[in-house]
Image (tube, rainbow, N blue to C red):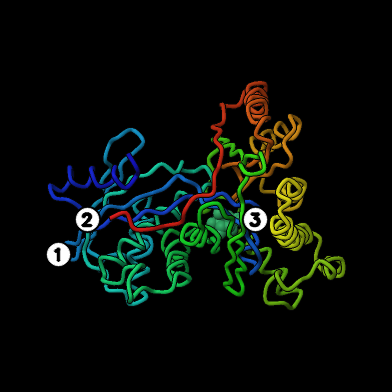
Amino acid sequence: MSPAETAAEAFTAEHGRAPEVAWSAPGRVNLIGEHTDYNDGFVLPIALPHRIAVAAAPRTDGVLSVATLGDDGVLHRAEPTPLDALAPGAQTGWAAYPSGVAWALRGQGVEVPGADLVIAGDVPAGAGLSSSHALECAVALTLLDLAGRPADGPEAPATADIARWVQISENDFVGAPTGLLDQTASLSCTESHALFFDVRSGELEQIAFDTASVGLELLVIDTRAKHSHSESGYGERRRGCEHAADLLGVKALRDVSIGELDGALEVLPEELRPLVRHVVTENERVVSTVAALDAGELASIGPLLTSSHVSMRDDYRISCLELDVAVDAALEAGALGARMTGGGFGGSAIALVRAQDREAIGQAVLDSYAEQDLPAPRLFTAIPAAGAGRDR
Ligand code: GAF
């Protein structure tokens, strides 16, 4: 059963009526371009086939009720809350994500009605694969539909606005100071493509990314080391970048070109230099990756992925033992390139591998984990899937 079918079935069992609408949104893997989004830079994600679905129907009493189907098959219910009572800090835990979206949409003048929502999905949580944004995007699309402004209708808000509203919910309600990468990926990625997103201009370009046609695979290694944006050093890195941009007299680090990097580093305090070096070189790597993909040279992006990892490990300092073990083992076993993906401090790594080496590289990663007494990671091959959409 698809996540949407599962959510619809759970909705009917819970509420004794069928849902009126259902929308789902995917998790993502960012191919390259990490911690560049809040620096107005470039990112290049793909959507995963893993999705979060929301089945819903309106209520007439102005109350939001939310329930989510756990991996254990048990339905977890949040306390039903009047929409008027939603405010940052009023809700914690998983329920803050859907509630925050309702709050943010209302703040933008969307007439969100009371609603029953039932959530189900298969994006691994805490794996750095953007399960929270998949959830928030699916909720946003569902509530917009119930508010009479479905994303596939004539009154639809611009997709960039929906992404921004989801960001407001995440930043101001959930309290995680994240950028625009994940929502945009979840809403705008397409099958067989990576999404080249220029965060400053808002421009989106679909870049063909068909690994199978050139005998390659993108292996995802979910390290199972849990990561979280609100508790990690994410905000600290973000503030460091903003401080560096201030000192350099630019709007964002996006404005520092690779040619200006050495000069910029000279005038910055020592502790900010590695952050700036990462962001400026990472933007450059995204542009080079897109150029290689456009030229049909998919295999040649491997070294760019690996340099990105080294930059995050040594300069941005957001890697961890589990991520480094995964990357090193994959590279030693013949991966063309490998890097951690997402916010860091845990979560997942990716490795670009030749299809015929996939098994051996996967085994090498598992062996390396066993040697280090780490719990076995979860491995799967990512195939770029479709972005968010209506299921009902
Ligand atoms: C997380 C954030 F949510 C994104 O906005 C982005 O900054 C990413 O970390 C790092 O590239 O996924």
Q: Secondary structure at mark 2?
A: strand
Residue 309 at least partly seen: no
Within the displayed image, which quadrant is ligand 1 positioned in? bottom right
Identified by mark 2, the residue type is Asp
Q: Quadrant of the N terminus?
A: top left
Identified by mark 1, the residue type is Asp
- Report the Cα–Cα distance between label 3 and label 1: 43 Å
Residue that protrudes farthest toward the front in the picture: 213
Question: Sequence-wise, which precedes: disc 1 or disc 2?
Answer: 1
Q: Residue at x 60, y 52 (%)?
A: 30
- Report the Cα–Cα distance between label 1 and label 2: 11 Å
Along the line of sight, the residue nearer the viewer: 216 or 91: 216
Residue tagged 3 = 34
Image coords of residue 158 (percent x, y): 43, 74
Pair 3/1: label in front: 3
Disc 1 crowd, CA 10 A, few/some/many (<14, 14-19, 20+): few
Q: Classify mark 3 as within 8 Å of ligand 1 or not, answering yes or no.
A: yes
Residue 292 at least partly seen: yes
Image coords of residue 203 (percent x, y): 58, 71
Q: Classify mark 1 as within 8 Å of ligand 1 or not, answering yes or no.
A: no
User: In the rendered image, which quarter is residue 199 located in?
Assistant: bottom right
Image coords of residue 64 (percent x, y): 24, 59
234 w.r.t. 268: above or below: above
Disc assigned to residue 61 = 1
User: In the rendered image, which quarter is residue 154 located in?
Assistant: bottom left
